[in-house]
Image (spheres, helix red, strand yellow):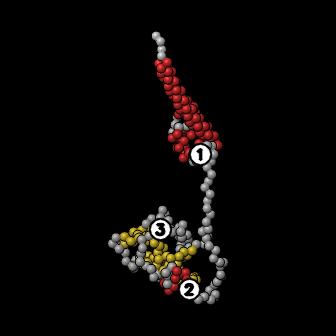
Amino acid sequence: MAVTIHEMFVKHKQYVCVNSTIDHVNFLFMSRQKEQDDKKALKIAAFKRLVKILRDKKISNVEFQKMKGIDSQTWNNWRDRGLPDKEILKIPEILNINITELTTGQCAQPTPVQVEANGKWLSGFDLWDSATPIYDDEVALPFFREVEMAAGSGRHEVQENHGRKLRFARSTLKKHGVAPETAACITVSGNSMEPVLPDGATIGIDTGNTIVKDGDMYAIDHEGHLRVKLLYKIPGGGLRLRSINHEEWPDEFYTGYTEDKIKVLGRVFWYSVLR
């Protein structure tokens, strides 16, 4: 049967279309295969970097498997197929490394730290003793001390020490809202307020500020014993006394206390520590 030119053209066009479709499918398949191969190569490279990191950290494969909670079969799968994506995210946290050490083999560069000054140079020390005159901007603050009463009574009383004094600038007291006539000093003893107030630290108290603010630090006269504590009000007019070193010195609770038992001497506004 004779074939017209038109029929030949149609058949040729169909052949070209089919051929083009096959070529396009082959191209997509090859591209996808290459993508998969590349991805597998990256995962295997990550596994090799993991082996090197473990060697550098002197961690055996068996030790790491225990750390990760995997068996030897999983380890062998990683070796043959590479590290799974989810493990590349988890392993750096276990080994305390940056993820780039697994993905690229390079350690991440630390972020530059911006150095900022946190101190200000004022001046040197002016030495003084009891014979040095007090300047116009100075005031000599008295010290409180705990005094044992009549011999054998076992009672104590908090009194002003009329000998020892500490010089303070009036401007400093004014800056903190403390009147010179209501300021006094105390020497801390024991370790109940460490590490803020170690044994021997000197504190300044404002005897004009005796209203308890929860969590603030105060000096108190506790039945003749001079103490420094964090104070908290409790219902019923009570007080909770807390030491900073509360692991060794548990909180003390006093309900319905009266001032003849616990007297707030003043709020701590300053302290000094010699090391």
In depth, the one of 232 and 223 nearer the eye is 232
| 118 shown above or below 137 | above
Q: Residue at x 56, y 40 (%)?
A: 64
Q: Amino acid at mark 3?
A: Ser
When asked about the image quadrant of residue 126, the answer is bottom right
| 59 shown above or below 232 | above
Look at mark 1 in the image and give the residue it sits on. Answer: 100
* Quarter containing the C terminus: bottom right
Q: Amino acid at mark 1?
A: Thr
Tell me if mark 2 has few (under 14), some (14-19) or many (20+) residues whose alpha carbon lies within 10 angstroms of its own.
some
When asked about the image quadrant of residue 129, the answer is bottom right
Disc 2, SS: strand
Look at mark 3 in the image and give the residue it sits on. Answer: 243
Q: Position of residue 59 (x, y in %)?
A: 61, 41
Q: Please tell me the numbered disc located at residue 139.
A: 2
The answer to whether mark 1 and mark 2 are in CB contact below 8 A is no
